[in-house]
Amino acid sequence: MTTTDARPADGYTGAIARVYDLVHQGKGKDYAGEAADLADLVAARVPGARSLLDVACGTGLHLSHLAARFERVEGLELSPDMLAAARHRNPGTTVHRGDMRDFALGTTYSAVTCMFSSIGHMTDQAELDAALAAFAAHTESGGVVVVEPWWFPETFTPGYVGAAVVEAEGKTISRVSHSRLEDGATRIDVHYLVAEPGEGVEHLAESHRITLFPRSAYELAFERAGLAAEFLPGGPSGRGLFVGLRP
């Protein structure tokens, strides 16, 4: 059995990026349904919306479905391996490499989205403000910014353990995670066992620190970015959605 330890500063890399989609789809994450709901939300807030930028787009599974709903869809991703996967999956779509805190693409969109709680990787209010300012700067007048937050301090469950076993593409993948409270943030340790006939078993490990921002911190960041925000409970992962309109 081989072991790989992945604790990158810029997101998911290497072997973990390659099994990421298999695990989450196997766990029941409905990328097509989420993309349809997101497109409907954008259309309701911005009738006639024609373009969308998905920030922290990961391997581009949302992008592949959103492309059918908008004239122009683009992505932004920091992790080189996730970026490569997104570009491979969406050959006709522009996917930029960039950091959500300071990217500058020289254009605007009807909608800017940031899903799957990627915003939680901001470490403090200053970084949260910077990200929302960048989102707003890339949003057309009358456009919308949609952000899926991480858990709030009062909704996070310390000690939570998640587990799943997935069979896909000839591989059997076991994923176990443990979440704990660490100085106002969530520390998530994740371990994978990836077994493939003729190849043996590979152990992959990663650890992420995700900030437990209170709802008020998100609302302040939206306000400072000049966005009129509302919070919608529920959302694709049960953590809700912030929706901010740019006047």
Image: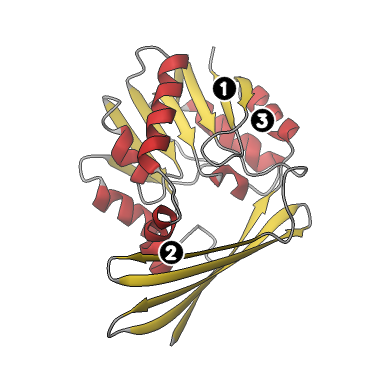
Q: Secondary structure at mark 1?
A: strand
Residue 154 position in % (x across, y down): 78, 42
Label 2 amino acid? Thr
Q: Quadrant of residue 140?
A: top left
| Label disc, if present, on residue 244 of the rendered structure | 1
Residue 40 position in % (x across, y down): 41, 23
Inspect this view and state whether residue 147 appears.
yes
Label 3 amino acid? Ala
Q: Looking at the image, do the residues carrying marks 3 and 2 touch, with CB atoms under 8 Å apart?
A: no
From this view, report whether residue 245 is shown above or below residue 38.
above
Which residue lies under the disc numbered 2? 13
| Label disc, if present, on residue 221 of the rendered structure | 3
CA separation, marks 3 and 2? 29 Å
Residue 224 position in % (x across, y down): 66, 25
Mark 3 / mark 2, whichever is N-terminal = 2
Mark 3 / mark 1, whichever is N-terminal = 3
- Residue at 40% of width from left, 82% of height from top? 201
